[in-house]
Image (cartoon, rainbow, N blue to C red):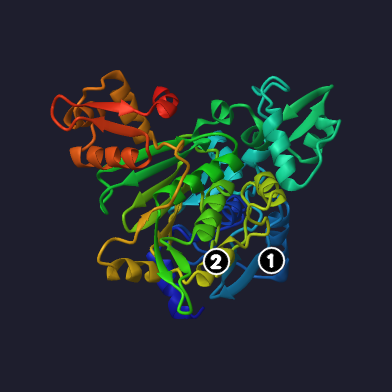
Amino acid sequence: MNKEELKFILQEGERQFIEFKENLSNIDKEIVAFANSSGGRIFLGADDNGKIKCIQITNKLKSQIQDIANNCEPKIKLLFDALNNVLIINVLEGKDKPYKCSSGFYKRIGPNSQKLSRDEIIGLFKSEGKIRFDELIEPKFIYPDDFDNNRFSRFLEMAGVALSNDIEKQLVNLSVAEKQEGKILFNNAGVLFFAKDPQHFFPWSAYTLVLFKDKEGSEVIDRKEVKGSLFEIIEEVMKFIKYYSKVAYKFSGGGPQRINIYEYPFDAIREAVINSVMHKYYFEHGHNNIIRFLPDRIRIENYWQKPANFVLGETVFRRNQIIADLFARIHFGEKIGTGFERIKEMCKKENAPFPDIEFNESYFYAIFKQKTEYLKLSEKSATPLATPLATPLASLTELESKILKEIKNNANITRNEIAHKLGIGLDTIKEYIEKLKEKGMLRRIGQTSAGYWQILEKNNKEAEK
């Protein structure tokens, strides 16, 4: 810093990253506030109006200030500079937030250092990972009443671990429960993985899936709320994506062998879905993770809290360490934070475009686009090569189930009446009735207004759901 720069700063006055101090009074408050924010500089020897007050800058003074910073919790390292009888104290953004001085917790807000309220302190602890959602004990969960033995057994099978005679010990070893005064207490990670009804405790852990007819995302074809254990949710999400994705095909040059070219890189999408569940900010109760499936893209929306100094592809963070460890045990992603690199490699392997990544302080978006080869094959064909991926006949979407239910209640109902009752466009109803016919689940008896619908007997159970 030179004299001209110092003069300019003193003229501009105090602001977000600049504080003037005439003496050492309450300087610990300013140091803590900058460390809890994005850092800043304290100009010791300047009054509130930017006028220089002559102070004697000595090594003793610097040591005194560093001692003050060392008495904060945790200690704060300072850097010093001096110019024109002004001691410039550089406070870097802290890497071990939150910081506290003798009078409490402070944060820099505009040109002021403001003391944090109880709720703001809790919020700071949460955002910095000092309080981790997945580690907190859920007092409403009662073991073994709320515990799902089958879900736990399936998890162990996926992890390649045998079920022990001492289940309680296994739960403690997995870090999903602890034993206190003879009782087994589950933490939130254990509830999300092994409760009979995880969404009874955490409704916002469900995953919302929406299929749109138009690129703008205004006309909904199908919508589904996926519930269950976190690892089951991922499996159901991928079933939905594969069901509505399309496939084109080509033949190998040396023979009649057919090669399927899928619309999207499923492995890469699965990795992104795992990351969205693993790193979700579960303290926020009002937001499900969402997948918006549009005609030309799949958009994954995750509510999160952006880590400090986050750099895409470089910053390694694990917001929910127990959840990450549980996923790693069943080979759902890795807990070392290599998700972006894995997605990049998977896309490269399938000649698929890397997803567009967007994020702000509260939301993270991954937008997957269709494969170039798939688009070329689809365009070349005189008749569409792209058809929905095959699924078992017993698999019904939410909209298909609703249509069958209306028909079961009234076999003479018209397409217009179904559209009106469900609040869905007529063209969409026609499209899904045709799908039900193709699946062998629905038949039209008679083609005139006197005709009626027949649900095939073997699928009546589906219509009753």
The residue where tag 2 is placed is 346
Residue found 25% across the figure and 51% down from its top: 214
The three-letter code of the residue at mark 2 reads Met
Dot 1 amino acid type: Lys
Residue 179 sits in which quadrant? top right
Q: Is residue 64 left or right of residue 3?
A: right
* Residue 302 % position (x, y): 47, 48
Picture coordinates of residue 118, whole percent (x, y): 57, 34
Of 392 and 180, nearer the camera is: 392
Q: Nearer the viewer, residue 47 or 307?
A: 307
Image check: 116 left or right of 240?
Answer: right
Image location of residue 16, percent across then percent down: 45, 58
In this view, the mark in front (1 or 2):
2
Q: Is residue 240 above or below residue 84?
A: above
> Which residue is farthest left?
449
Give the answer, above or below, for where 118 lies relative to 82.
Answer: above
Is residue 431 depicted above or below 137 in this figure?
A: below
Q: Which mark is residue 62?
A: 1
Residue in the picture at 21% in, 32% down:
419
Q: Label 2 neighbourhood size at 10 Å, few (<14), some (14-19), many (20+)? A: some
Instruction: Pick the residue in front: 251 or 215.
Output: 251
Closest to the observer, 300 or 111:
300
Q: Can residue 21 be seen from the camera position used here?
A: no
Q: Quadrant of residue 140?
A: top right
Check whether the beta carbons of the residues at disc 1 and disc 2 lie within 8 A of each other. Answer: no
